Structure formats: structure tokens, C-alpha cells
Image (tube, rainbow, N blue to C red):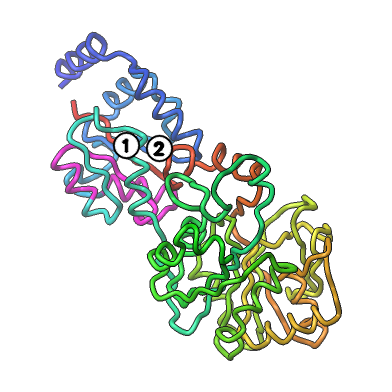
Amino acid sequence: MAKKQELTSQVIDELLKPNPEIIALFQQLKKDGLKIYVCSNSIRETVKQILLKMELMKYVDYFISNQDVLSPKPHPEMYWMAMTKEKVLPKETLIVEDSYVGRTAAISSGANLCAVKSPAEVTLAKIYQDMRRTFQSAKWSDETLNVLIPMAGAGSRFVNAGFSFPKPLISICEKPMIQLAVENLNIAANFIFIVRRDHYETYHLESLLRIIAPGCKIVLTDGVTEGACCSTLLAEEYINNDAPLLIANSDQYVEWESGAFFHSMNAPHIDGGILTFESTHPKWSYIRLNEYGNVTTLREKEVISNQATVGIYYWTRGTDYVRYAKQMIAKNIRVNNEFYVAPVYNEAIADGMKFKAYTVDKMWGLGTPEDLQHFLNHHPAMRRNKTHSRQVAVEVAEQ
């Protein structure tokens, strides 16, 4: 046994050398915040020697050998051990495997498999493509829910920056911004879009929107309104009822779980909810909470707490939103000479209605050229057209 290990060490020392492409791959995975576990049927010393020789050890969070488990591959024990140590679920784990026994172990573990034929196929594009395919959370489905998305703004900052298409059609990783926003909601519901007539006719938006949201309703406006709140009321015939209503911006990307949010709203004596994220920048609107976690105040473009609104607003009954939106407009309550959607909550709160805040992991604004560029430069899913995950398990080739 000692002689065999000595020969193995000699082969590793003579034949293996650092691979710049593999090192760069590991570096990028770590930069993107992923955990890397190595699970191998080799003995511990061999795994360690390979990782050191390949100059990969400093990127590996933990490695597991056949000496660390009772049952090596094709049994999934070592993958279960890795997931348990990292406190992640199988659905949060991607396993890269090129061997039959390794793939069998990966599938048996319940994790997601990124199958490759050889180490040469292990690329960032391949890994993130499989993540995008497998890590999408379950879509929330509610056939009574109305999802209203106004997309009738002027988008003047993009026009002034030289963009040729209107803001909802600006391409982000080969998708129109409005498609990215709708897919990001991850909801199966009744979609309603408020669209400028000139955009609708010039860019054939009916076909596009019905592909993005089959069965959707489209409301046309002949010009720019006095604000997003006025635009939403153009869809009054579809939302002025007792069905739940979600109003969402068309220019944002949110890291959230739609199902978790709607489950949190399924509680007695709640009239709606507001998605929030941590910020202190005055370009957002902000809420203030009382000791019971209820929203007491909302201010547009005024920092009154560290809880900024995401741009997704939920009302248990659409008719409540319509009533209080009209009331706010009648009072001529404007910000920067516009009627915003968020301050409508203040009218309802004054009448004793209760709204809860729901904090998301992160919100990326897409509403200005600067925000869009920041998103493209810094969001892992966009830098390489990929989706973020928590863990990658990478196999060391068997020795």
C-alpha cells in the first residue's frame, strides 16, 4: 500500500502542473461567493497532493476522500457529508461529475448534476448554464392574482444617453428589460401591462407581451401620464375588484422568493404588503414600522429609515388600491410634480388599514443608464449570463 502511494505521489509530482484556466475558474467561483467542496474516491493524501500541485487548495472550502466515509461513490455518502457540513439542501447544490460512478452518486444524493465528459468541459459557462436551469425556485401560481406593470414612462434618461429602443425594450443579456422583469417576478397570474400606444404600434408589443405573459391584458395610453399612479388607474376595469393586486415596476431585478412572500401575506388582518431592501440612498422611497411590524409611514424620495421600497406593492384587494389612489390624486399629493404608487399606502394607513413589510435579499434598479450598467457589471447572473447559487461540488479526477 505504501509503495502504491509512493508511485502515485511520484506520478502526480511528475505529470501534474497548474492549469491557468482551471485556476481562473476556481477564482471566479469564489469571487462570486460560491462554496467549493471536492469529493473524491481517492485517499486523503492523494486528494491533498493533487490540490496543492494544481494550486487549487486555497480556493477549496473542504475536501472529502474515500477515507472519510463508510461508503465511497457510487454511494452518495460523501456528497451528503458535504451538504451537511455546509448546511445546504440538495436543491441548493450543483455537482460536477465526469465518471459513471460519480454521476450515479450525484443523482442518488438528490443534488443537481452538471454532467461532463471530461475535465476540459468544466467551464464557467457550463456551470452557470446548469445553475440557471436547476436553481430556479418554484413559481408562485394564483389564478385570482392580478399583476399590474406600468411601462408607459418617457424613459428620458435612456433617450438622452443615446439608447435607440424605449426602456422596456433595452436588451439585457439578449432579453428585453420587460421580459427580464416579468421572469424575475416568478409568478403565474393575470398580467396587465400599461403601454404607450406609439411603442405598442412601432415595436409590435402585443406579440412580445403575449409571449412573455400568455393571456395578458394590454392597456394603451396615448401619452405620458402625470405619474405611475395615474397610469395604473388606466387599468381600473381589471383591478377594481376584490381580487389581490400586485403592482410591479418594469425596471428592476429582485433577489427574492415569490412563494415565501405570498405565504407571509396569507395572514388575518393584513391588507397588503410592501417589499423592502436595505438602503439609505435618497433616490428610493422609504417606510417606517411600528413595534408590531406594521407600516406606519411611507415617504417618496425621503430617507426616514434604512428600509427602502423595492417597487413591488401588494394589496389584498384591488378595490382598496383604486379607492385610495383616487383619494391621493384628489388631494393632489405629488412628489416632484408626479403621482407615485407607493404613497397611496399612506391614505389607507390613515384609515386604519394594516400593511406588512417583507425584506428581500437584494434589489437591483434598472431605471437609469447608471443603474443598468452597475447591474451588468456587478450582478453575477449578468456578468456571464448566469444565475447565482450557494455551492458547487467539484470532483477531483480519480487516481
Q: Which residues are magenta?
A: 77-106
Say whether residue 82 is magenta. Answer: yes
Question: Residue 44: which quarter of the image?
Answer: top left
Check disc 2 and report its element: helix, strand or loop: strand
Please state the horizontal and vertical placement of residue 183, each as a whole percent of the image.
45, 60
Spatial CA span between label 2 and label 1: 7 Å
Residue under label 1: 394
Disc 1: CA contacts within 10 A as few (<14), some (14-19) or many (>=20): many
Give the answer, above or below, for where 109 lies relative to 370. below
Disc 2: CA contacts within 10 A as few (<14), some (14-19) or many (>=20): many
Check disc 1 and report its element: helix, strand or loop: strand
User: Do labels 2 and 1 touch, CB within 8 Å?
Assistant: yes
Say whether residue 226 is magenta. Answer: no
Please state the horizontal and vertical placement of residue 286, each as a whole percent of the image.
77, 62
In the picture, measured across the screen, residue 219 lies left or right of residue 288, that is left
Q: How many marks?
A: 2
Question: Which residue is located at x 27 percent, y 56 percent?
Answer: 110
Residue under label 2: 36
Q: Amino acid at mark 1?
A: Val
Pick the residue in front: 357 or 17: 357
